[in-house]
Amino acid sequence: MTAASSSTRDVLLTCPLDCPDACRLKVTLATGADGVERMSKVTGDPGHETTRGFACAKTVHYPARQNHPDRPLYPMKRVDGELVRVSWEQALDEIADNLKGILDRSGPSAVLRYNYAGTMGLREGTHVHSFFRALGACELDETICASAGTEAWSLGYGPRYGVDMADVPHARTIVLWGINSLSTNSHLTPWLTEARRNGAKIWHVDPYRNRTSRFADTHLRLKPGTDTALALGLAREIVAQGWHDAEYLDAATEGFGEFLAAAQPYTLERTAELTGLSVPEIAELARAMGERGPTFIRVGYGMTRHENGGTALRAVSLLPAVTGDWKRRGGGCTLSTSGAFALNRSHLGAAHLVKPSARHVNMNELADALQPEAGIEALFVYNTNPAVVAPDSTRVRSGMARPDLMMVVLEQAMTETARLADYLLPATTFAEHADLYTSYGHHSLGYNPATLPAPGEARPNSWVFAELGRRLGLDTPELYWSMDELMAALLDTDHPYLAGVTPERLKAEGSVPLNLPDEFLPYAHGAGTPSGRVMFTPVPGYVPVQAQLTPEYPLRLITPPAHHFMNSTYGNVEYLNRAEGNEPQVMVHPQDAGAAGVQHGGYATLGSEQGRVRRRVHVTEDVQPGVVVVEGTWWGLSAPDGQSINALTAQTLTDLGGGSTFHNTRVHLRPG
């Protein structure tokens, strides 16, 4: 921490948002004429190996979110349909009293938490689950983003290890598959650029052309949901040409023969037919992976947003085992680096209290869970905005509005979910509370102290749930742990990756790298599976997406991230709304625009089995025929019809992990 002048100072803090980069930010704090210190500027820490001195296009604008004039600052209660200010004592007493009645009447399975990754902090994001586990409330299966990929990786490799970013420049073939990394993993870009200077060629495999496609040397615009077919076709061609690593396959893997047999039908011609790519495109990528290694594959969760998404990610992630690239520096595959953070999580969020008999709710099925017959009488929402982000959002909002449901929302912004709350409790931001952060893109732990005074009466999530726990007489010690107690418990481990990482060091340095080997090759000799080997079984086989296109619904909708939003975070920042075009737009190929009778710049209605939305049309050849794209989870408040794009999406789950299928919505397009 250094003083920049008498009225400003700079502090270093870890970004809390759901992004693999987990940046170390340089935050400028300015003291105003009123004597109050506020966040005024955000850049990147130039001394951090990953952040390298720049913040992404989203987070440089965090001060506008932090200081937003509509930020909730005081507890509020719904009275006669309106939210009115009340004291913390009144809000907490009434919530606790209502909970006591629900618990006495219906038991803890009538209470549901709904949360996700609005903060990646282990205290304010995860440990606060202790309150609900002390109650014995429903367990929320946190499946909306990563669960399909996590289970797929676990089947093949066990813990989620990845290629260290600093090793990427050693790769000579780089495949960015199902990820728009320039928008969602932007701090990988300097390493990609360095690899390119070293002679690497960069491929992008994605259904539509975006920033990463333009950055790459080659873009393969495959049909949505055909990733498994492409992976099997590549594997078959690599083996047919003798580019596989037989020694590695024999020593470190299991089930490759079965996998290869399953790949045999996927000739170059058959693969081209299924994926919409050309035979030369597929053959060229196979040759690059086979002859110009090491090959580094950065996979995203995009390919998992289909019913067959888990299988797709399994197939793609096994390709480095076919080529033996796990043995070579810069070679391999990264989905997540989170497995390297070998913290002692046994009491994190009071995980030890979860009973096998606990009722589980898949977060993708919130619309069903909020129907009266499902028996949920109290819903607590924190670190997420389900009125916008959950599938089948019209039914979600309808369920939230039930008069017999108590909905308590802890929030930093006046989201659409917050506006529907019965009790709205103002939450602190990452600069206003202490927390500890892992990463799923690099290998450093981050610690933030509470740096700014909380404005108004905002309070940390952990404070709110501890206060409710006291009112309910809960005696679970973890619920009342201090930050120091939590850090001590998490670091109570003898894992070599955490050697030398202590609470004292984290507080002193802020960001501490894990104690990884000098040459980190996590699967060079096998994997963390029960067999100790990379598992090709169960064999991933290509299955077409179930929601087949029809004359009534002839188009496939995909909803990838926008460049300036982080899921629904920043949806209320005016500058970023302007940067994204002021309102959500649907990208349509000229051929499909002509067939539907819609025009560039005009409005169109998209319809699915779930609902309807109205969007402005952007006609472009960046998308392929048969596919329409709406980038970003815009707040409905920014849309012409007030609807989230998730009014169109269904609760259908993936083949592995019970994940979301946001990229597999079939729709029609109508003028107007």
Image (spheres, rainbow, N blue to C red):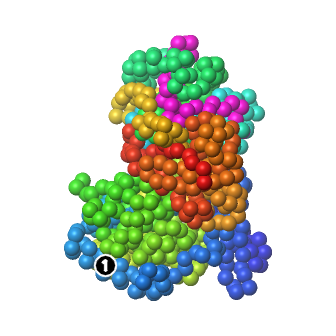
Q: Residue furthest right?
A: 5
Is 250 situated above or below 203? above
- In depth, the one of 581 and 279 nearer the eye is 581
Residue 226 lies in the magenta-colored region: yes
Q: Which secondary structure lies at badge 1?
A: helix
Q: Residue at x 54, y 50 (%)?
A: 606
Image quarter in which the C terminus is found:
bottom right
Q: Position of residue 298 (x, y in %)?
A: 58, 37
Q: Is residue 268 above or below residue 401?
A: above
Q: Is residue 67 left or right of residue 551?
A: right
Residue drawn at (68%, 60%), measured in percent from left and top? 582
Question: Tag 1: residue type?
Answer: Asn
Q: How many marks?
A: 1
Answer above or below: position of 265 versus 470. above
Evaluate whether residue 77 shows in this view: yes
Q: Residue at x 65, y 40 (%)?
A: 594
Q: Which residue is mark 1?
A: 98
Which region shows up in magenta?
215-243
